[in-house]
């Protein structure tokens, strides 16, 4: 039985996307675009390094050429959709949200996805795909826009209109502050503050803007004075969403950010009360002979659980106060997911040791949180590729298979499209910010550890980890 109080998984399993109308955010070959990155086709026989570079660079185009032209934020997706909910299961404490009128059009920007886009921009500068000064200009554009956009006690909404800065509500209760999406956004900005540290007017201005956002985010407000951290708050509905952030899932970063805040930090009691102390935190079972330390989902749930937090947090050498080893968690969850796909109990076409990876993303039925418990025969390329730091040999096999064997169907000007199903002869034409970003970032963390080094050296983050009882072998350089 899937855990019902995980908002993201709850929404992803409930939301089915229909009425798609494919729309690019901007023209691919805009001659006036600064530091234009030309798309490339498929070249078989690339070295591993050459293949990773090609995939990173082309995927980054989603955030560079596909960004919103006014705000610079990452679009939620490259196509427009109308969302409708099909409630297969509902927590009786919840009222049914009304999402029938929610449209994710060409102005719908993703706050969390923008955080991954910021981290991808750092990679692009480091690898020379774009100029440093041009990148700083884009990040200032984003920061200036967000300083004047809808914000609630320093916390941003899940979706935002890229021209007006107004909230695009998820439903009638989820219409304002989203603590988890804000944690991804600010993780990205804090990495940028570390990376762009030169004594130039523009870089000093960017760092100032980022510090303003970081200092203003009131994480402690979301405790309601309890030993719980709540996902949402709204000026219209208060805490009526009543959604504590329980573990284990993709939200560890939210507790780390909340404990790291210089002015609005939470104490360890909040982490113990609603994360490490929750009934869904520990697992300890073995699947396919592989032990899974954390999480109450059979076989671990979608792979994004092990990817979003660890775009910035280095799991190598990271151990919590209960003795849980986070590289073991990340690696084993990935290995179990792959083993399930190889076993292929539902006998879907295409699953193999080279073609694996179940996570949340688009499918022939809409947007679904794919995992062994909810297996529709759909592979998301981001699942295996973004696991590169945990299972490099197997992830590289999958990356090469997607590129060389499936590329004629899923390779595009923005990298791999979001998903495919050989069984249903379905191949997405869409790209999602929260799936594209981890591809760029996690390949880079495997290659150089760049984002891990930047984020883990921040004194506030070290303080937050220590507050929560984590130990970590920090890099010596």
Image: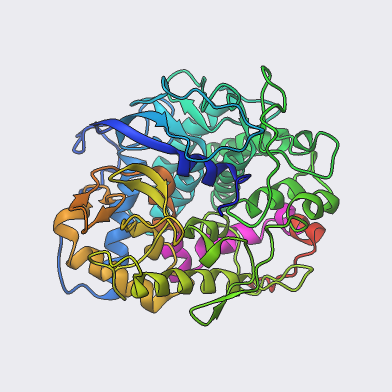
Looking at this view, is 154 or 457 the one in front?
154
Residue 48, visible in the rendered structure: yes
The question of residue 451 being in magenta is answered with: yes
430 to the left or right of 127: left
Furthest residue toward bottom: 289
> Where's residue 73, x and y in %?
44, 34
Q: Is residue 39 above or below residue 334?
A: above
> Where's residue 252, x and y in %?
65, 54
Residue range of the region highlighted in magenta in the rendering: 442-462
The residue positioned 59% from the left and 70% from the top of the image is 329
Q: Is residue 450 above or below residue 240?
A: below
Looking at this view, is 408 or 313 the one in front?
408
Q: Quadrant of the C terminus?
A: bottom right
Q: Main secondary structure of the magenta part?
A: helix
191 to the left or right of 109: right
The residue positioned 39% from the left and 41% from the top of the image is 134
Residue 40, visible in the rendered structure: no
> Where's residue 378, x and y in %?
31, 56
């Amino acid at each position: 039985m899937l855990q019902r109080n995980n908002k993201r998984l709850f929404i992803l399993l409930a939301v089915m996307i229909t009425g798609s109308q494919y729309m690019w955010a901007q023209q691919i070959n805009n001659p006036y675009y600064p530091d234009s990155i030309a798309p490339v086709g498929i070249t078989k026989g690339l070295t591993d390094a050459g293949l990773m570079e090609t995939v990173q660079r082309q995927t980054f185009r989603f955030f560079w050429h596909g960004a919103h032209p006014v705000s610079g934020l990452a679009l939620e997706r490259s196509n427009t959709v109308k969302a409708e909910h099909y409630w297969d299961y509902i927590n009786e404490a919840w009222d049914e949200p009304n999402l029938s009128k929610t449209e994710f059009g060409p102005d719908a920007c993703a706050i969390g996805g923008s955080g991954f886009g910021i981290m991808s921009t750092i990679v692009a500068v480091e690898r020379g795909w774009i100029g440093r000064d041009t990148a700083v200009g884009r990040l200032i554009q984003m920061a200036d826009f967000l300083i004047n956009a809808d914000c609630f006690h320093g916390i941003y909404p899940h979706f935002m209109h890229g021209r007006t800065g107004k909230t695009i509500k998820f439903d009638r209760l989820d219409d304002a502050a989203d603590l988890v999406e804000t944690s991804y956004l600010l993780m990205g900005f804090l990495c940028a503050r570390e990376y762009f540290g030169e004594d130039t007017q523009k870089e000093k201005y960017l760092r100032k803007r980022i510090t303003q956002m970081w200092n203003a985010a009131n994480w402690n407000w979301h405790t309601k004075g309890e030993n719980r951290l709540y996902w949402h708050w709204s000026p219209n509905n208060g805490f009526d969403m009543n959604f504590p952030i329980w573990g284990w899932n993709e939200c560890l970063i939210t507790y780390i950010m909340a404990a790291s805040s210089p002015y609005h930090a939470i104490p360890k009691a909040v982490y113990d009360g609603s994360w490490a102390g929750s009934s869904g935190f520990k697992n300890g079972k073995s699947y396919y002979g592989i032990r899974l330390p954390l999480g109450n989902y059979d076989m671990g749930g979608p792979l994004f659980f092990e990817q979003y937090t660890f775009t910035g947090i280095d799991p190598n050498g990271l151990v919590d106060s209960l003795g849980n080893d986070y590289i073991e968690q990340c690696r084993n969850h990935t290995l179990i997911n792959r083993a399930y796909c190889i076993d292929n109990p539902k006998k879907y076409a295409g699953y193999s040791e080279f073609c694996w990876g179940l996570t949340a993303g688009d499918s022939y039925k809409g947007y679904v949180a794919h995992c062994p418990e909810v297996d529709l025969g759909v592979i998301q390329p981001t699942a295996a590729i973004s696991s590169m730091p945990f299972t490099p040999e197997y992830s590289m096999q999958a990356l090469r298979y997607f590129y060389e064997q499936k590329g004629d169907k899923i390779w595009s000007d923005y990298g791999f499209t979001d998903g495919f199903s050989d069984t249903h002869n379905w191949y997405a034409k869409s790209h999602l910010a929260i799936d594209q970003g981890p591809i760029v970032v996690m390949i880079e963390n495997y290659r150089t550890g760049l984002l891990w080094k930047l984020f883990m050296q921040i004194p506030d983050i070290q303080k937050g980890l220590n507050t929560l009882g984590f130990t970590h072998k920090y890099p010596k350089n």
